[in-house]
Image (tube, rainbow, N blue to C red):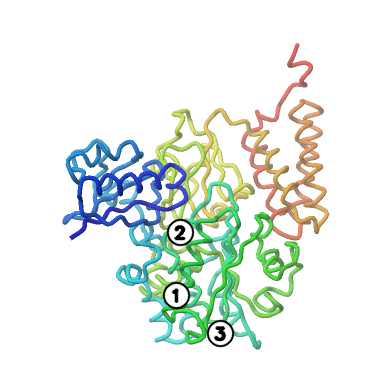
Amino acid sequence: MATRIFVPRDAAARAVGADKVAAAIADETRRKGLAVEIVRTGSRGLFWLEPLVEIETPGGRIGFGPVEAQDVAGLFADGLPPASHPLCVGRPEEIPFLKKQTRITFARCGIIDPLSLADYRAHGGGRGLERARSIGAAATVAEVTKSGLRGRGGAGFPTGIKWKTVADTAADRKYIVCNADEGDSGTYADRMIMEGDPFLLIEGMAIAGFAVGATKGYVYIRSEYPDAIRVMEQAVALAGREGILGESAGFDIEIRVGAGAYVCGEETSLLESLEGKRGQVRAKPPLPAHKGLFGRPTVINNLISLATVPAILADGADAYAALGMGRSRGTMPIQLAGNVRHGGLFEAAFGLTLGEIVDGIGGGTRSGRPARAVQVGGPLGAYFPRKLFDTPFDYESFAALDGLIGHGGVVVFDDTVDMAHQARFALEFCAIESCGKCTPCRIGSVRGTETIDKIIRGERVAANLALITDLCQTLKFGSLCALGGFTPYPVMSAIRHFPEDFDRPPLEAAAD
């Protein structure tokens, strides 16, 4: 019987040579006459160990990593690699980074063959949709509401309320739209699900369709994710052939690719793009739940929200709601990036502190220097200094400090970071990515970038800081959507917590 060897095909692993490693293993085992089956999986999310190769043994999988192509000959020198090999990391699930997690949404990532329905079902897939159909549409909406699941894309709006609104709205047709336009810096959870467990998303969307009476779903993926697009298209085709999707199932899914505009992560801009129009924000009301895609009631959820629904239905709302703190229930895929030693995805219940995330889970900075700041929530998220590292990771705690969790990206900076330049980046980013529909965002971001440049040059610093503060108030309360509305968060948090980086002498004086 062939021994199974698991090598990730996740884009992060491929970027550091996973394809070459898989090819080298195939060549080496063929040359040695070893009976093996190479299974390409998603990633477990331990990026500092990628490519992480796993060998199936009677006692469970044994991991080796990070493995490079030139390591393969030595790894298989005496047949299958022994546990005593220097690259052996033991059983992956015993690695502290994995062992401390509460994996619900990402339970199968890095374990199964992403395009094997048999593998998906063998690891519990499909139970959520089965239970939803057995309890009925109204009870399914009630379960999602009871679970406390909130939108994992940034706004944190209760998912069940959105579903009930669509379910209660009469229309000749309704839609489910998955927002997989993952554009925040330091985020990759959507991509990992699409590449590592695509049938989970399909099941979640099918449950949503059943619950609200929708017959068609769209997955909107950014064009920068070619691997995710390929896997999702193959998975949708497989699900169609198996009768999970299509006319007989009463629900179908189509993959749509966006051109990469950040503003299309905002739900109404995304809908405009799906309709073939320029991605610009719509005024609300009407809400998409009443009049969304093609003027019909539409559930538009972030990918992680939809991918979490199958577990809620399979195991019950109470089990999910038992995790977390306050109004932040369940788990969140925390994505560690930037200057951090152990970058990767860590799924845990809400309530960990920033310090526990950065120092305990992330292992501190990769440079070895002190961590000075953490940005949570993408390019429009607030910067938190070391003195706020006791802040719990939940929606309300962050909101109280003018911060946002967003999609769960945590980007770490050491003490060499220049926070004035980080504030400038936020304003420049908004200027570049603005859809141009509203004046505060379109013009305010450009004027803000110019004003920050004056501060960096040491020109009338106090007066220009006052101007930036006033401008940020206009952006926050006058913009049509969160792109302009959230840009003040990184700018003002940088000014508030790191004032020394803005107190600059004029360049001429500094040169003297």
Query: Could you tell me residue 189's position as x and y percent?
Result: 48, 55
Residue 335 at x, y percent in the picture: 48, 49
Quarter occupied by the C terminus: top right
- Choose the circle earlier in sequence order: 1 or 2: 2
Q: Contact, CB < 8 Å: mark 3 with mark 1? A: no
Q: Earlier in the sequence, mark 3 or mark 1?
A: 3
Residue identified by numbered label 1: 239
Q: Position of residue 181 (x, y in %)?
A: 60, 59
Cα distance, mark 3 to mark 1? 20 Å
> Eyeballing the image, is 430 above or below 494?
below
Q: Secondary structure at mark 2?
A: helix
The tag on residue 224 is none
Q: Read off the residue under disc 2.
A: 195
Looking at the image, residue 220 sits to the left or right of residue 85; the answer is right
User: Is residue 492 toward the left or the right of residue 134 in the image?
Assistant: right
Q: Name above or below for residue 454 compared with residue 138.
A: above
- Identified at 81% across, 27% down, the residue is 459
Q: Nearer the viewer, residue 391 or 508?
A: 508
What residue is shown at x 45% (from left), y 73% (from top)? Answer: 203
The residue that disc 3 covers is: 213
Disc 3 marks a residue whose amino acid type is Gly
Residue 495 horizontal side relative to residue 177, left or right? right
| Residue 62: % across, % down | 24, 49
Q: Is residue 386 left or right of residue 6?
A: right
Given residues 451 and 58, the one toward you in this image is: 58
**Contact, mark 2 vs mark 3 (Cβ under 8 Å):** no
| Residue kind at label 1, given as amino acid type | Ala
Identify which residue, 359 or 276, lies in the foreground.
Answer: 276
